[in-house]
Image: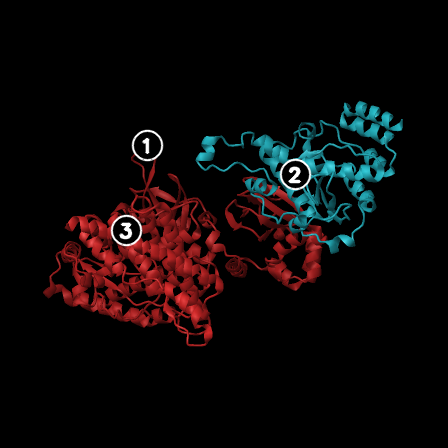
Chain colours: A red, B cyan
Amino acid sequence: MQAELIEIRNHLAQHSPFAEMPEENLDRVVSGIEVAYFRAGTEILRLGERNNYLHYVRSGAVEIYRRSGELYNRLGEGEIFGHFGLLMNRTVRFPAKAIEDSLIYLIPNEIFQFLWENDDNFTDFVETEDHSRLRSALSRREKSNQPMTARVTRLISRAPVTAPNTVRLQEAARIMTEHGVSALLLMDESGDQPSLSGIITDRDLRTRALSEALPSETPVSDIMTDELITTRSDAFIFEAMLAMLHNNVHHLPVMEGNRIRGVIALSDIVKHESQSSLYLVSNIYHQKDVKGLKRLSQEVPNTFVRMVREDANSHMIGSAMAGIGRSFSQRLLELGEEKLGPPPVPYCFMALGSMARDEQLVVTDQDNAMVLDDSFDPAEHDEYFLALAKFVSDGLAECGYTYCTGDIMATNQKWRQPLKVWKEYFADWIDNPKAEALLNSNIFFDLDGIFGQTEYTEELKTFIAERASNSQRFLAMLARNALNRTPPLGFFRTFVMEESGKQAKTFNLKRRGTAPVSDLIRVHALACGSRAQNTFNRLKAIGQTKLMPEDGVDNLRDAFEFIAIVRIRHQALAIEAGREPDNNVRPEDLSPFERSHLKDAFQVVSQAQKFLKFRYHAQVGRNVG
Amino acid sequence: MSGDQETVTNVQSETLPWPERFRELARQTGDDRLKAFYEAGCVAPDTPMKDVPFVAVDFETTGLDPDKHSIVSIGLVPFTLDRIKLGGSRHWLVKPQLPLHQTSITIHGITHTDIDKAPDLDEVLDEFLTSLAGRIPVVHYRNIERPFLNVALRWRIGEEIRFPVIDTMAIEAHLHPNRRLNWWQKLRGKQPVSIRLADSRLRYGLPHYPPHNALVDALASAELLIAQVQHHFSPETPIGDLWL
């Protein structure tokens, strides 16, 4: 082998079965390689034709079909095909087609036969079918950072299965069984073009039809989900995963404009990425009791560390962790309802603070509340909701989400109220702002409905967005509170002076790092009437107004990401070292790189605080004067 | 006197089609290696691309000016539109006649120590020309390989070499005629289409290879040509339409 072909050799060496191969065999493979290029849509192997090569996907994507024409497998970078034919008289058994422009390395049959006779690991690999292969592919994917970069289209294994939305339940169930799918897309065919109008899943059939003993001739439109959560065909698998976590759905139609490309299921992603947070989430829904959930919760820190290792950004990690927290809450609510019976009036379980902002990490307490239907009668119904709130809160505590020290939990009667009372609360906070009271109610301005009638929370978000943007006094007070915690600029100066051996100080990366940023961004977001909860999304909304200078928005986003990721890494390191993760950082915990960038990031935050002070105090002066 | 005569015959052969021109040059050359190269012949201009034997060639040099800089390494890969055979690839380090510039070291990573042990181009010329014989060279940016080779040959054997080339960069330039932006597009922050090797490859879904190794660059241009033909031409396109 020419030494210069090391690039090709290195690529092979990252993928099984070449990764485990002795060097001299690998050299032999590289020297024998022939390179071929296939444009998207062209056939690589045709059924029954002669094939003399083991095929290795260097770049692009390839689909493998069964004899029947049915899709058998979809391969990407570093995967091999064509070996079944080589083992069976060199005739193609599984045709292959390039679905993206693909560069294929062809390894001649002589070399394949040599490896097959002399390399046990290689032989095992090519002779092992599907299952264990998938597992080795998954561990490989974890290494090569796949979940962050792979697109959802990778997971689509078949054309979408659809039916008119006028079919009856029995017919829908029959179609799903016949096609072996767990979700059926329902089309509105009344217009010129059929359009997607709803989805029904296995789970819906079980929970909405069978358990309610609905007659089989009930129209499917009676129980289908018509407020569809979909994903774009160019979305990353990770984004789809977040959408599922966030909305607690297990199926996502994949859309290309108005065209349906297919449906991806939670189980597809789980298969794709068995180590991911989703794997954990799908297991959460299978737990039968609090004990099971508690056992599972011990996996959460590992999932967190794995995502940090995979170089996920703080938004991904924060959303995934919040998604996990939401799933625990949701499952506990389901279990609670099973135990206590159905709720006497509708209600919504609401997450507050970091979970609502999609910015949860591993060290976290629970902040939640209940919004009850306006027909709620305390004497008649509150016993039920208190019991349910207590069940969930205790369960969350079991799972590591400690009780809120400020008692912001649905177990507190004050935070277990009908929608109209919640509106009064918010109206009072906004119209009669008092600094002290607002300090404690800050957390209610980050809210998200996670179970039950989530539209109650949506109504509150709209209520807040409209009212807050019009109250300069409220914004000024909120701004003043947001300035209480300042970034530790002096920390870096003292750090230099303290190197002489005195005990170094620590500072809290949450209280003096991420929290001041999310606080000040909340003020701007409320000022511009945004309904967004996540800090990055709020920044995006702020950026669309002229409220802040444009580079101010960009700088603040970068600063927030950097501080958040340092905090995340700090916690991941602690977990890996077997310590309790916390937010307190000592100077020696930081690399020189982190130190210098943190300093810059804190400067940005400090500037942003000055701007906040000027922006809202000035307004207040004018109003009052 | 002999010099004059050579010029005269060259002028005549410049107008001939490549196959005849190769026969003519084989008669004229005074160097056995060049004679063997020309005698291996050149395909007819109407030969479909799919039947043409190619060889992708790349030189790493100490700079961009053939009169001031020298070749330090040569990579080549024989191929057809159907297949690139890595087994036939070759790579040589050669000792430059002009000093290595510090800046060029940082580009191709070849150091003085590597070069001290390397042979003179003259010693690998035979093998190099044998690898080229009967094949159409493919390069990315033709103003490197031919001019550098000519200066090197003139200096060593007092002759130049003539052959047609396929230039994958010229093909990209032809496919993107309006890649220079007008002021409006620049104002709107539009990015010009880059026809550099790595950027061109991206457009065809070809993987990223680390640049500035002669063999890897040669392989990269071979793959690029195959992709270009599949996307924009046809395997039946006559070679005469594309060579320069």
Q: Give the crowd class for mark 2: few <14, some 14-19, many >=20 residues within 10 Å.
A: many
The label nearer to you, 2 versus 3, is: 3
Residue pictured at 29% horizontal, 35% vertical:
A190
Which amino acid does the dot numbered 3 rest on?
Answer: His
Badge 2: chain ID: B
* Element class at badge 1: loop
Badge 3: chain ID: A
Separation of marks 2 and 3 at Cα, in angstroms:
53 Å
Name the disc covering residue A192, or none.
1
Same subunit, tags 1 and 2: no
Please give left or right for residue B188 compared with residue B21 in the image. left
Residue B139 place in picture, x, y as percent: 68, 38
Badge 1: chain ID: A
Q: Is residue A545 above or below residue A205?
A: above
Camera-side residue: A50 or A457? A457
Name the disc covering residue A524, or none.
3
Please give left or right for residue B190 compared with residue B4 in the image. left
